[in-house]
Amino acid sequence: MVELSNAALELAQNLKAHAARGELNVPMLPAVASRVIQITQDATSTADELAELIQSDQALAMHVMRIANSAAYSPNITLVSFQQAITRLGMNLISEIALAASVSGKMFKAAGFEKDIDHIWKHALGTALWSKEIAKSCKRDVEATFLCGLLHSIGTPVSLQLLCDINTESSITHDEILNLSQKFSRAMGKRVAIAWDMPEIVGEVIAFTNLWPEAPTAKDQTAAVSAGALLSRWQITQQISEEELLQSDALAFLNFYEDDIHALLEHSSIVHNTLEAMTV
Amino acid sequence: MTYPDTPQTNTPESNPVPVILEHDQENPLQEMTEVDIAVIGSGPAGQSAALHAAFSGKRVALIERAKYFGGTSEVFGSIASRRLYQNVLQKVTSASLIPACLAARPGETEMRALINMEEVLESEHERVLQRLTHTNLLRIHGHARFKDNNTLSISRIQQPPLTLKAQQIILACGAHAVDQNPKNHIVKDQPSTNENRWVIDHEHCFDHESFLSILYLPKKLVIVGNNIKACETASVLQTLGVSVTLISHSLAPMPDQSKELQDQFLSHFLSQNGYWIPENQVTRIYWESVGNTFCELSDGTLIETEKVFIFEQTIPNTQALNVEDTDLKMDDNNTVRLATTYQTQVDNIYAIGRLTDINCSPEEASVQGREVIDTILQASTLPLSKQQQGKPNHWIPTRFYGFPEMAYVGEIAPYVLPQRPTTHIEESYDDALLDAPQINNSQVNNSIVIGRSQLYRTLEQQAVWNNMGIMSATGTLSLFADTETDAIIGAFIIGTGACELIEIARMALTHHYTLEDFIHSPMSSSTDTYAYTAAALNILQQKGC
């Protein structure tokens, strides 16, 4: 753990003061992402609307097509049109891809921290994908889990950007700012969930991922995202051993027997391929 | 003896049994444990068997694989239905009796605002534990697999595995919904076959467990199935403004229920703009866009909807038991083949509940749990305990469902219900009519007479329930009595909030009530209970008294 200098501690106080004065500008949820969420929650919306929305952003449309054509999704077929991709993959999956692409690390501007944000975001995506696999095994809350996993650590990059914005002291180290961003992650995540008008369950998961036993109403969902984060770290950083996964309290809480965990890990190549496709 | 050291309890002297507490840090289970009876599954069947055996002085282990004791099917079934219904009722009541004022709106309301399954599971688990902890049975949270006819290997979470030896083993592990094709995602151009009909992905297509954790209340919904759970769910969600299409393979809903209930349900369902599609089968379910999930029916009809709930096609949970290492035989539909009532082809292994009859109700399963223990005890050389010496089960209510309260108490089912087919046959409305009850103030035969009365409801209650489209806003009571002796034979009760009437019927049977008891009892004329007096008077009127 990084020992914080006085300057870093002052920066933390400064951020709190900004928050108290209502001067923190949480990044806007990208218009495309906001619209994607709106469409997926509105039964009267049509597939054409979503297709039109994604195609209105050329970079996003290309990104979606690239992912749709990746081995993870279309191993034996080449998709040549957006409509074909929709038919092949289904609009919910296309929505998830679009959401992951539009709410991405690129939203955040924190000079010098680009690689850190990429890493944070890749972990968030991995968490979203693993959380969904876990939720499917549990037959619970599958619909909301991808979004919960994707945004569980949204407070970290937002804090990172805001700390960079208000920092005027050059003596504060890179690691200190990263450390501060993690300290503010939970509180900032809750602000983001409110600012972006997320379903209540998303806010609860953001607030309690690392404290899932204390989650007031959605302990299962929060434990699923916490376990998803562990699996994501296991896969991306290899800093977690398989033995540690077998001993995961979150997976135990969700009633995963050793056999179930091994069955879950059989999905690792699918998750890996999807993750690689989404983070190209 | 391999039990942990524990004090003795009061049991028949001939069979002293140690108290077995929940295993914990201070009192861990030994690697090898022996019991008289091992029960696999803690649903209504397993609970009932384990409790009855424990009260009878047997050393019993109750093994549950799921996180919570209580049985997945039961908790996600009638208990969840009841909670959802209560919560919806509360919302309607607080909205000044006008459904349009409901806070819940399809497409905008999170399902969690209506029912939080975590809370339901935890509270039910607590209730089950309260019952179980009053006995000396051993509770084991683990996954049991057969090693041989008498030995189970039990894997546990974050704990060492156990080996459990048992003289008798009772299988009561229920059933789960069928995923028609888990390995194959269905896309639009995929040809449909009978073996390849749908994938339950828990996003578009849900089973009876996962539908309770959908994110938002759908605006349009297809429910596949015609059992009482499907009909209950349809009613509740209609109340919240969801447009429900119900697809049934038979002509009538709830084919194993009384004609009276079928008619009441259908009438309300249609009046709430429900779409009833009888005598049809779903051949394929696929999805291609947001809000667009398609159900293809056997007659070629294509239904566009938002979500699909599957309430049929369940199979017994036998696959994970490792039955290959036993001499058990399975039938084609994965049910356990029985040699005699409850006893499998292996002498010491019994099967009850939905393992042997996929349509078995929780109440029937519960009765089977008691009966299988009676069977075992009668076959054993051990003396019978006081608790199980010939206690009749006929006063135990059967088909007791939560929405609305409905129960048959006493041996009256033949007068009320269509006979359940023993094998799958095509249902017919006409056939159902043949067996439907003829209970409208008429004598069934010379020995039994039936009195009928309406339940008393306040205007406020009626307004709420009518607005909700609940099947039985008023409710009825049919009282069955012996023509000669006036002894009460049973009662058939339908009525929201009528639990007390069911209990009164049980009390009447256990205490051998006659018509006179109901007529002279101080039943309050401003409550449901007066229905008993009214029904008794109705019988006297028929008899010309």
Image: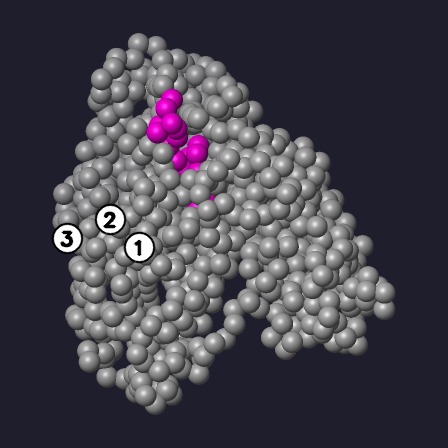
Q: Determine contact: label 1, label 3, CB under 8 Å.
A: no
Residue appearing at x 48%, y 33% in the figure = B308
- The kind of secondary structure element at disc 3 is helix
Residue nearer the viewer, B526 or A54:
B526
Q: Which residues are magenta?
A: B192-213
Q: Amino acid at mark 2?
A: Asp
Left or right: residue B368 versus residue B34 is right
Left or right: residue B482 versus residue B186 is right
Q: Would you name the residue on which mark 2 appears?
A: A260
Q: Would you name the residue on which mark 1 appears?
A: A255
Q: Dot 1, how many residues are within 10 Å of its Cα: few (below 14), some (14-19), or many (20+)?
A: many
Residue A3 visible in rendering: no
Quadrant location of the N terminus of chain B?
Answer: bottom left
Compare marks 1 and 2 and give the one earlier in the sequence: 1
Q: Comparing marks 2 and 3, which lies closer to the viewer?
A: 2
- The kind of secondary structure element at disc 2 is helix
